[in-house]
Image (tube, grey):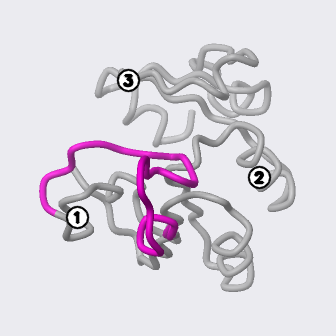
């Protein structure tokens, strides 16, 4: 069984996965279609093994929340393509998506999260009509 699955399970994380994930790590519970689009708000992780960057991008486009996505890679061209292609508020290379936080971005205490493109209501000027996409390049940073 891959070390990461053992480490996650030792911390009480329930890992669910596709058939290939379960072949690689037999202790992983089977994932179903609803798992891919679920934010558990618990120690549950769904893992999908993909064959290519194209398949990963399609999977994220279908099931992603639009908040934060990350790629772990040594392939610079794959990283660049991921940064451009993924339509999320924060896109990371070789860093944890747990850095997606108002405090981490220097905004002060976080009071909410929006994955919508247009978040303002009422009278709007140019600032209210502007959306942001943060591109974060890392070298293996994690956040506990």
Residue at position x 53%, y 65% in the image: 91
Report x, y in % for residue 58. 82, 50
Quarter containing the N terminus = top right
Q: CA distance from mark 2 to mark 3?
A: 23 Å
Q: In front: 143, or 26?
A: 143
Residue range in magenta is: 108-132
Q: Quadrant of residue 54?
A: bottom right
116 within the magenta span: yes
> Label 3's element?
loop
Circle on res. 104: 1
Q: Residue furthest left?
A: 109
N-terminal label among 1 and 3: 3
60 within the magenta span: no
Residue under pointer 3: 41
Instruction: Indicate which label's residue lies in the foreground, 1 or 2.
Output: 1
Residue under pointer 2: 56
Report x, y in % for residue 47. 62, 34
In the displayed structure, 25 sits above or below 95; it is above
Q: CA distance from mark 1 to mark 3?
A: 20 Å
N-terminal label among 1 and 2: 2
Q: Quadrant of residue 52?
A: bottom right
Q: CA distance from mark 1 to mark 2?
A: 27 Å
In the displayed structure, 93 sits above or below 102; it is below
Relative to 70, is 86 on the left or the right?
right
Q: How many marks?
A: 3
The crowding category of the residue bearing disc 2, from other C-alpha atoms within 10 Å (few below 14, some 14 to 19, many at least 20), is some
> Label 1's element?
loop
Q: Are marks 1 and 2 in contact (CB under 8 Å)?
A: no
Residue at position x 47%, y 42% in the image: 3
> Label 2's element?
helix
Q: In front: 4, or 125?
A: 125
């Amino acid at each position: 069984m891959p070390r990461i699955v053992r480490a996650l399970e030792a911390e009480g994380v329930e890992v669910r996965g596709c058939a290939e994930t379960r072949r690689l790590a037999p202790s992983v519970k089977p994932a179903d279609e609803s798992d891919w689009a679920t934010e558990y708000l618990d120690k549950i992780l769904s893992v999908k093994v993909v064959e290519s960057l194209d398949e990963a991008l399609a999977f994220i486009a279908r099931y992603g929340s639009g908040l934060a996505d990350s790629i772990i890679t040594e392939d610079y061209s794959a990283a660049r393509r991921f940064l451009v292609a993924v339509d999320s508020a924060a896109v990371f290379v070789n860093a944890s998506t747990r850095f997606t936080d108002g405090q981490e971005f220097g905004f002060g205490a976080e009071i909410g999260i929006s994955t919508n493109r247009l978040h303002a209501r009422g009278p709007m000027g140019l600032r209210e009509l502007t959306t942001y996409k943060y591109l974060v390049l890392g070298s293996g940073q994690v956040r506990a």
